[in-house]
Image (tube, rainbow, N blue to C red):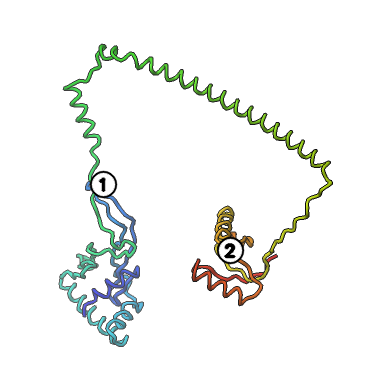
Amino acid sequence: MQLEPYISDLLYRYECVTIPEFGSFLTRRVSATIHESTHAFYPPKKILSFNEQIQKNDGLLTHYIADVEKIPYEEASQRIKKRVKYLKSYLVEGETLDFQNIGSLSLNTEGKILFEPSYHLNYLTDAFGLSQFVSHEVTRETYKESVEDIEKVVPIAVTPERRKSRPYLKYAAVALIALTVGGLGASKFYVDNINEHNKLAQEQANEALENKIQEATFVIDNPLPAVTLNITKQSGNYHIIAGAFRIEENSDKKVSQLKDQGFKARKIGVNKYGLHEVVYASYEDRLEALAALRDIKRTHNSDAWLLVKELD
């Protein structure tokens, strides 16, 4: 029985996969790297290693083989033992064991197992879909050197005639500064005049208002009829929530929008999450609130919901 497919599957999920009585494959995560000479970018990955000192059966590989092959645990354990016996005899004969997509094992002159990992698979699931790529070296300095070489061959000189041919630039700059300063002074004068005019108009308006008040104080022979205002105060513990907002200004805008659409919208305070809650309306009767909620969810807002809460 080949163990490589099962070991490879487990290396994606575990840091240590042990072959009982043989050794363990270990993984270690490393960050993304850049090769200095080739300018190749390599994604993060798991580096594989092998430790023949860790041979105690932890049951991970045996349980996995038993589950995949649909065989009893004892039978899976026997198959592993048989395969390990074959692998050890193969190494003793001086052969190299190739574990597909994992690496190769061989014995050194001291009888220790040497492991050469394979780089065909990246067992780090976080790096799935990432591959290496090469970024070409930026040759900005090379272009600069080329330009310097060209300037040595064909020097670029500004003759006195060219400098004399554009004296108007100096006068244009002086004129621009003068216009800017003059514009700032004129702008300040204009603003001061507007402020003075507004102040005078405000004083005149206050004086006219004071005169009207004095006239109204003495004209009381024909008092105005009393005005009755009918203000309906919403009450009830059943509230149809339209939304909750972190910024109170947004909740005010929502209330205004809903009122324009004919709803009796209002704010009912701040909930335990610090959000300003806005309701379409509040009801005293539960059935009436549920009927209104169904209508709102069908015609206006499918995310509306009913809050049962006694307000202060």
Which residue was labeled with disc 2? 263
Q: Secondary structure at mark 1?
A: loop
Q: Position of residue 218 (x, y in %)?
A: 83, 41
Q: Is residue 31 above or below residue 63?
A: above
Q: Quadrant of residue 59?
A: bottom left
Residue at horizontal 57%, vertical 23%?
A: 189
Q: In front here: 280 or 106?
A: 280
| Neighbour tally class for label 1: few under 14, some 14-19, many 20 plus, Cα within 10 Å | few
Residue at horizontal 34%, vertical 61%?
A: 29
- Counting the numbered discs, the total is 2
Residue 141 disc label: none
Residue at horizontal 20%, vertical 67%?
A: 104
Q: Quadrant of residue 20?
A: bottom left
**Type of amino acid at the residue the image marks with label 2:** Phe
* Viewport quadrant of the N terminus: bottom left
Q: Quadrant of residue 274?
A: bottom right
Q: Position of residue 133 (x, y in %)?
A: 24, 53
**Type of amino acid at the residue the image marks with label 1:** Glu
Q: Position of residue 151 (x, y in %)?
A: 20, 24
Distance of mark 1 from mark 2, alpha carbons?
67 Å
Q: In front here: 162 or 131?
A: 162
Q: In front here: 199 or 116?
A: 199
Mark 1 or mark 2: which is in front? Answer: 2
Give the mark nearest the N terminus, 1 or 2.
1
- 24 sits to left or right of 268: left
Q: In front here: 73 or 305?
A: 305
* Viewport quadrant of the C terminus: bottom right
Q: Secondary structure at mark 2?
A: loop
Which residue was labeled with disc 1? 36
Residues marked 1 and 2 touching at CB (< 8 Å): no
Q: Residue furthest front?
A: 222
